[in-house]
Image (cartoon, grey):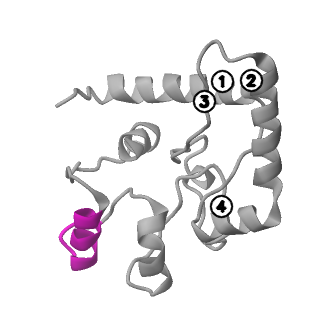
Amino acid sequence: MAAELFKMMSGVDLVHVPYRGEGQMLTDLLGGQVQVAFGGISPSIEHIRAGKLRALAVATAARLEALPDIPAVGEFVPGYEASGWCGVVAPKNTPIAIIDKLNQEINAGLADPKIKARFGDLVVAVFPGSPVDFGQHFAAETEKWAKVIRAANIKPE
């Protein structure tokens, strides 16, 4: 999906090679069977640090603290961002007081220096915010990826 978004936004044609997981993709990339891949940073970072892989760019909106010399794709393809994310959700009818308390505690945890450092070790950026912020992000991501799916004519297998 990240490669399809890149193709759409840059006009660069890439051949999609399907893999069942990142392990085989990394093996083929390290072995020279494929020349470029869009993959998660966590499985790749030690290969990058060891000089076995050359990171061309990160797909996050900005450069990563863990790899400050590696540009974000958005620096040369304006508006590009294809990072993975997750959020905390609750059942539809959860009382607002509970939602607010959960949000407050989660944001406090994300601000804790030890927790921030641990996420940094895992090459994960954290984005504290409100339930409204998360809802807006969720809606925007759904719209963005729906456009990619339609444009690339992606079908479920």
Q: Are marks 3 and 2 in contact (CB under 8 Å)?
A: no
Q: Can you identify the residue that label 2 sits on?
A: 132
Q: Work out how far the residue at label 3 is from the one at label 4, CA to CA, in angstroms.
A: 27 Å
Q: Work out how far the residue at label 3 is from the one at label 1, CA to CA, in angstroms.
A: 10 Å
Residue 20 locus on image (x, y percent):
21, 52
Q: Secondary structure under badge 3?
A: loop
Q: How many marks?
A: 4
Q: Secondary structure under badge 4?
A: loop
Depth check: 12 or 120 in front? 120
Q: Residue at x 60, y 44 (%)?
A: 78
| Of labels 3 and 2, the one closer to you | 3
Q: Can you identify the residue that label 3 sits on?
A: 89
Residue 112 locus on image (x, y percent):
81, 59
User: Which is nearer the N-term, disc 4 or disc 2?
Assistant: 4
Q: In the displayed structure, would residue 66 be above or below residue 25?
A: below
Q: Can you identify the residue that label 4 sits on?
A: 63
Which quadrant holds the N terminus?
top left
Q: Work out how far the residue at label 2 is from the one at label 1, CA to CA, in angstroms.
A: 5 Å
Q: Secondary structure under badge 1?
A: helix
User: Which is nearer the N-term, disc 3 or disc 4?
Assistant: 4
| Of labels 4 and 1, the one closer to you | 1
Q: Work out how far the residue at label 4 is from the one at label 1, CA to CA, in angstroms.
A: 24 Å
Please tell me whether residue 29 belongs to the stretch shown in magenta: yes
User: Which is nearer the N-term, disc 3 or disc 1?
Assistant: 3
Q: Can you identify the residue that label 1 sits on?
A: 135
Q: Residue at x 42, y 23 (%)?
A: 146
Q: Which mark is residue 44?
A: none
Check disc 3 and give the amino acid type.
Answer: Val
User: Which is nearer the N-term, disc 3 or disc 2?
Assistant: 3
Q: Range of the magenta residues? A: 23-35
